[in-house]
Amino acid sequence: MSVSTAPARSRHRWFPLPHRLVRSLAGQLFVVQVVIVAAVVAGGAVLAYLFTAERTEDAARREVTSVAHAVADSPTVRSAVGGPDPTAVLQPYVEQVRQDAGVSFITVMDTDGVRWTHPLPEQIGKQYLGHIDWALAGQTRSETYTGTLGPSVRVVTPVWDDRHRVVALVSVGLTLESISAQLSGPLLALVGVAAGALALGGLGTYLANSRLRRHTHGMGPDELSHLYEYHQATLHSVREGLILLDRAHRVVLCNDAARELLGLEGELDGRPVDGLGLPEALVTAVLGEVPARDEVHLTAERVVVLNTSTIGTGLGRVVTLRDHTELQSLSGELDSVRGFTEALGAQAHEAANRLHAVVSLIELGCHEQAVEFATAELALAQQLTDRVVAAVSEPVLAALLLGKAAQAAERGVELTLTEDSRIDDGVLPPGLAPRDLITVLGNLIDNAVDAAIAGAAHSPVAPEVTVTARIEDPRRGDGGGAGAGVVRGVGGAGVAGGDGGAGRGDARDGACLLLRVADTGAGIDPSAVEDVFRRGWSTKQDGRGHGLGLALVAQAARRNGGTVEVGRERGAVLTVRLPLAGRVRECEGATA
């Protein structure tokens, strides 16, 4: 069994290779090119042969014509044709001339065509085979005719006497066999040159197609076509954004997902990546020498996760983008829920402590003190809840404010809602996503609480965060103080307020939702206002990867056609205005 299977394996390994070679694109091109080279070489060889044969025959005609004229003009021939025995004189003479000239035959005949000389002595005295009429008329002509020696190229010329009469004829010829013998040398050289050219062309074609076969991985035209179709379908169907850059950081390929994530339009091929209008931080990460790994970046309306890698040995760069917008929103909501849970846990712990205190007072017989203590704590806890529920009927904002108030209280920060805060239920449009509200107000409060805690270490003032949430309608003259200091707008107009000046919302196309958060921290340095909403900016130095919250606030405001302003009172004041009439109607901050 083992002996018989080995040849079968060998046959299976080797015989399919020619079929694979011909089936591949490189193999088909190789066969076509070899055929073309062979046809060109063969055609050139045939043309060269025909040209050489024609020139050789022309040279033979000229040669026999020259010999014929020389013999006819010879004094020996002229004197012999008038003698009693021309053959005796002329036969040895013309044979010597024939051998010296290298022609096939020299025949001298009378005007009737009877031979006096011939290379074959037995043909002397017989009739000449060929045409002599034009020679008798005094002309010299050549022809190809089959005589006693076979086919030959011959010429017949007259012999003139002193009276200018035709007294004899001379025929000189070269057989086609001898002409072919003259062509054998050039023909062999031509065949050698043609074979060499064919071999060289075949070798060059083989080397070129071997390189092509390596690059195409031995695939055929149909396979390459299908691979291209699969490639295009895959690129434009995946949900991840993909951008390919060349060595000069120009766009080679950008799929549909990348266009959507980055908000790119128009023709992108060949454009430099730093000329696409992308955020500076994103461009810096793409062009950086160190590959990016799961870096979070902000575009005009989305949060994307960036990864980059180098193609080969510096051929270019691959940029992949994942949409992180929804996940970031969910993460914010999860953080809020986690904060609520922690706040509830802290409140449960405090409630247990208060309950123990009430029980102890009752056990000591201090019933009135127990009732006063319990009702006072209940009133204090219910006061903020009643205030928030009465002022803010929007469930998402109310729940967020209550949760953030509990978190702030646990961290020692008092969170208050201003008296003019009021948002009725159903006022917010359906297009204003609750996630965006959580993103905006949650991040503003988180930053304000952190700033108030940091400012308490350098100020005797108790840390406090003040929140304003209301509908601002410029047609009714509503306005809110943004605080004196620097004001910087994002997504709309931002201006500088004067001392004690009140920033007034100018919603020319309708009412706005105003969310303002003020803290008792150190405030924002005026020189840093331009960078506040840039990803990565933060005053915290604990190395926890801060610097995304305010960037998300600015993005959410921009996505909803609103504005963000930075001001200053006791600390930082951040004001967000979101239009209630949709994204096409922007709220713009203005100075009253």
Image (cartoon, rainbow, N blue to C red):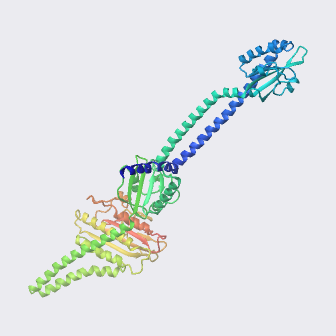
Compared to residue 77, the image places residue 11 above or below, namely below
Residue 420 appears in the picture as rendered:
no
166 with respect to 568 (left or right): right
Compared to residue 442, the image places residue 268 above or below, namely above
Foreground pick, 326 / 278: 326
Q: Quadrant of the C terminus?
A: bottom left
How many badges with numbers are in the image?
0
What is the x, y in percent for residue 49? 66, 33
What is the x, y in percent for residue 516? 36, 70
The residue drawn where x is 24% and y is 76% is 344
The residue drawn where x is 87% and y is 17% is 160
What is the x, y in percent for residue 327? 36, 67
Question: Quarter of the image holding residue 570?
Answer: bottom left
Residue that protrudes farthest toward the front in the picture: 122
172 with respect to 35 (left or right): right
Residue 378 appears in the picture as rendered:
yes
Compared to residue 45, the image places residue 397 above or below, namely below
Question: Quarter of the image holding residue 118?
Answer: top right
Foreground pick, 559 / 479: 559
349 with respect to 32 (left or right): left
The residue drawn where x is 31% and y is 71% is 334
Compared to residue 273, the image places residue 198 above or below, namely above
What is the x, y in percent for residue 328? 36, 66
Foreground pick, 349 / 213: 213
